[in-house]
Amino acid sequence: MTGSPGAAGVLGVVVVNYASAALIDANLGALDLTGRPVRVVIVDNHSSAAEAEAVRALTTRHGWELVALPDNRGFGPACNAGAAAARRLGCSTFLFLNPDAVVTLPVLEELRVHSLREPMALISPRLLDSTGAVVFRGSWWHEADGRIRGAARGVDWQPDAPPVPGARPWLTAACLIVHADLFERVGGFAEAYFLYWEDVDLSHRCLEAGASLVLREDLVAVHDEGGTQDGQRGRGKSPAYYRWNCRNRLLFAVRNLGRAAVLRWLLATPRVSWEILLRGGRRQLVESPRPATAALRGALAGVGLAAVTLLRPAPAARRARRLPVLVVTPGAELYGADRVLLESVIGLLAVGRAVTVVVPGDGPLVRQLTDRGAQVVTCRMPVLRKDALRPAGAWRLGRDAVAGLWPAVRLIRAADRVYVNTLTLPSWIVLARLLRRRVTCHVHEAERSVPLPVRRLLSLPVTFADQVVVNSDVTRRVLEEVVPWVRGRAVVVHNGVPGPAEPSPPRTTLVGPVRLLFIGRLSPRKGPQVAVAAVELLRARGVDACLDLVGSVFPGYEWFEEELRATVERAGLGDRVHLRGFSADVWPQLAAADVVLVPSVLDESFGNTAAEAVLAARPLVVSAQDGLREAVAGFTSVQVVTPDDPAALADAVQGVVAEWDGWAGRAVADSAEARLRFAPERYRRQIAAQLGQAGRRR
């Protein structure tokens, strides 16, 4: 297939499992994918310990990737987790496939090639059951009342030719392929649905983004509906089917349609819910009350969602459009979270929003923001840090809270919505909620090393946010451990990390000392002291190495920098270890380096510095922290070592030196993939889309 449109693109087949390991083995496991550009990701929505073991054995036997979720997150969230894993494996397009769906290798390949050829399209084959009866060949939802109607027999399904006015097309996620760029552009599946209607919602948002829906009538997949519904076959449906269909119909209206449409759908709820219930036949109503009870439960939940929307005062749309998004951040430097904040602001400005950014003081971030068109305001603010647990820190926190209260109120009142960049600004989250402004909290913290009561206290303010965005699956899991009631609300948006205009190639040969680089805060948790100890070990082993430490300390941590300098002098490394201070532009340092070290001693939520190293085409050594692992998963130029272990760090550096050509070549290859994975454009679109969704829900 050399030269064909799909020659280079890897397909990620994402299957969500819930007590269906045997079905997956029988259907997908029957395909011989050896040598094909296909990766399989199984996402296990936990059902039982026995099933978890079965799916683990299944994925090990077939060499598939397993994403094991600790509980049942629902279809959409699991699909998003699977897509993220597929992306890390280098996949360019995703096929979402039900466990009870069967697809042949030729169909799989044709779908892959079509998606790569037409990346702005959602594509589905025609679905038949094992008897040859049509299960799906395109469908419509109706603006008038939210009914679902499949394509009529004998009539071709044409998305741009609805059978009646107000009919809108959608494609099922039972067997649905979407290019990774389109999927990320629209923010993936909406995670509020749990089951059903998430594919209707995805289809709608893709159309809104300018994509098309394509039904490949010439391609067939077999889908015996009910195979995942507790073994249920025939016309009957599971209680979950009735509950979530009745609820999510109204959720879709609330999320995507205007108030008039929400009212129409609400008034039609008794009739449409009855139609949904009758999809399983009348006999089931006599045999058990469970179907009717489930439908009633779902309908009432949907009515509640619609009622809240209708009872809320209508937004003054034009006024809201003029009002800015208020972005609040606890610092004005250019470290990881600061750079991510900058990308968030760029994304909001790109969709036409006015943005006001509140910072506690001056710093290099301010110039970056104003250059891009944001207004920047300085305001005293209470920032939750660990020193607040000590008397002096608590006094400073209270002082800043009092001094910053009235300025914060004025700024929030003048805004349409509030975007709080970290958990450490609780007063802004609470004030925004009290002043009836939409508030999004972007969580970057994932610290399991902190005592549980402290973690719970620091994380509690997120309860008051309308929407929670987290920078990794690790961050989401850590947050849900301490505030479990946000489960299902936290949306993962992986950081966008800008790379250099053109990465400088690694040195051809290592002449002179191997140049090691550490970039980041000079703090004990980031591990620069471990890097210094590793250089001392390398010298003792006869390896010529030098180390640049690029970064500065938090105010109040000057003692650590002094201690670090003293350690360097005591070890006689004054000519080998250099503290370069903070640099807003890290690319010259990365271009001059041979190997980058990220030796974090404690938890990391993501790892922007690690991403920057891969983007710069440099071999990388990171600590075995979950967030760092997630950031660099799939890259071949990265070594993961035990945290706080100078010997392991030194061993890894020696390994790079011994096989320099191989490591350098892999780093160059990884850099190209990293430019796709960490694309700032993808991140900006997702953040802008998430804040848009928050606005519609509130």
Image (tube, rainbow, N blue to C red):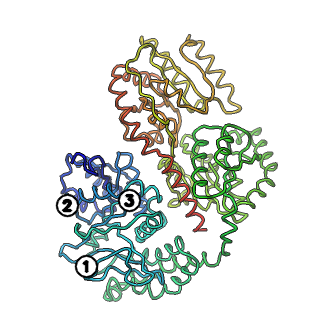
Q: Dot 1 surroundings within 10 Å: few (below 14), some, or many (20 or more)?
A: few
Label whose residue precedes the other's in the sequence (2 or 1): 2
The residue to which callout 3 is attached is: 45
Please identify the residue farthest to the front as the structure is shown: 3
**Residue type of the residue flagged with mark 2:** Thr
Q: Dot 2 surroundings within 10 Å: few (below 14), some, or many (20 or more)?
A: some
For the C terminus, the image quarter is bottom right
Disc 3 to disc 1: CB gap under 8 Å = no
Identified at 74% across, 48% down, the residue is 377
Q: Dot 3 surroundings within 10 Å: few (below 14), some, or many (20 or more)?
A: many
The residue to which callout 2 is attached is: 104
Residue 134 percent location from the top left of the image:
24, 77
Most foreground residue, 303 or 109: 109
In this rendering, position of residue 87 left or right of residue 314: left
**Residue type of the residue flagged with mark 1:** Gly
Alpha carbon of mark 3 to alpha carbon of mark 1: how far? Answer: 25 Å
The residue to which callout 1 is attached is: 234
Q: Is residue 190 above or below residue 448?
A: below
Classify mark 1: helix, strand or loop: loop
In this rendering, position of residue 435 left or right of residue 635: right
Residue 205 percent location from the top left of the image:
46, 66
- Which disc is residue 265 wearing? none
Classify mark 2: helix, strand or loop: loop
